[in-house]
Amino acid sequence: MTDTSYTPPKVWTWEKDRNENRFSNINRPVSGATHEKELPVGKHPLQLYSLGTPNGVKVTVMLEELLAAGHKGAEYDAWLINIGEGNQFGSDFVAINPNSKIPALLDRSTNPPTRVFESGAILLYLAEKFGGAFVPKDPAGRAECYSWLMWQMGSAPYLGGGFGHFYAYAPVKIEYAIDRFAMEVKRQLDVLDKRLAGSRYIAGPDYTVADMAIWPWYGALAKGLLYGAAEFLSVHEYKHVNRWTDEISERPAVKRGRIVNRTWGEPGSQLPERHDASDFENVAKAES
């Protein structure tokens, strides 16, 4: 179907109140800080500034997995960045991530402190920092892992900013846009399902950073936790994706990581900030 109600102007200009949606108050066509704002600093070398969205969950799962594997140096403070209130445009946050997106990591164990932004970059930084943790040692396995990690980085925008936006958030339902991105998301699920038909994990027989990157997006989608689109996308058809999703969901570190910096859902699924392993005890009490 062709939408003939809109003709693009010769030169696009930003009109703040045009096409209002839940993200209108934080979207803008320029970068940089909008206000001066210091970030809090905790007692651990690793300071994470994030929110419990799929991109944020990648990093908190990685940190919890590192701790579970015995890497004591992976202790971290996780500070909440409320993107709905524009916290990501504060001066200190922009100094860590000039792109004003969560998550952002500051490693204060180095002099000067090392900033890391973009979730995939943070996963690789942490893997390298802790001796190649959750990355295959052999070159071929490592290449497979990195390939799937980059697949996720390139694919998820079609799921989130594409399908998710037009299906769930756009002020009007545009058939062409929803059809276009639904087709692409189902193709991506098919890519994963075929891969997982012959492999326990994404990159091979071992659990890696590729699983940590892909699971928060496509695992949540497979379980109907994204955009209320499970029936629309027939996610039950992808049995291997569902098998893989269920297995990863049972990992204790994943259960912890997925609730860090989360401020919605049942009380037992929220830990807005995390500064010590004992913080999870309060969540357990809220759940019981």
Image (cartoon, helix red, strand yellow):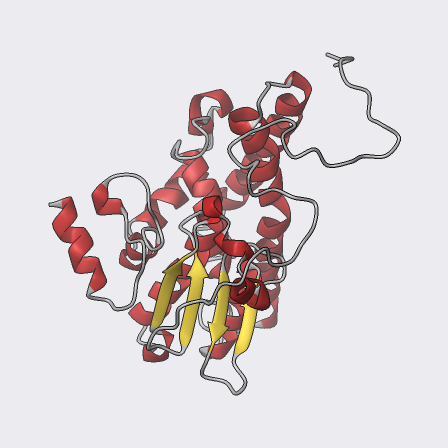
Q: Pick out the residue farthest to the front.
A: 36
Above or below residue 260? Residue 158 is above
Q: In this view, does 59 lie to the left or right of 161?
A: left
Give the position of the N terminus as an image quadrant: top right
In this view, the residue in front, 13 or 257, is 13
Q: Where is residue 200 in the image (x, y as percent from the top left)?
A: 43, 51
Above or below residue 135? Residue 221 is above
Asked if residue 110 can be seen in this view, the reply is yes
Q: Pick out the residue farthest to the right.
A: 10
Q: Is residue 264 left or right of residue 232?
A: left
Q: In this view, does 179 lie to the left or right of 133?
A: right
In this view, the residue in front, 213 or 10, is 10
Give the position of the C terminus as an image quadrant: top left
Asked if residue 188 can be seen in this view, the reply is no
Q: Where is residue 182 in the image (x, y as percent from the top left)?
A: 59, 27
Q: How many labels does the image show?
A: 0
Q: Where is residue 163 in the image (x, y as percent from the top left)?
A: 58, 31
What residue is drawn where x is 29% and y is 56%?
256
In this view, the residue in front, 89 or 214, is 89
Above or below residue 97? Residue 5 is above
Q: Is residue 189 left or right of residue 284?
A: right
Q: Position of residue 226 (x, y in %)?
A: 44, 34
Q: Pick out the residue farthest to the bottom.
A: 111
Above or below residue 137? Residue 199 is above
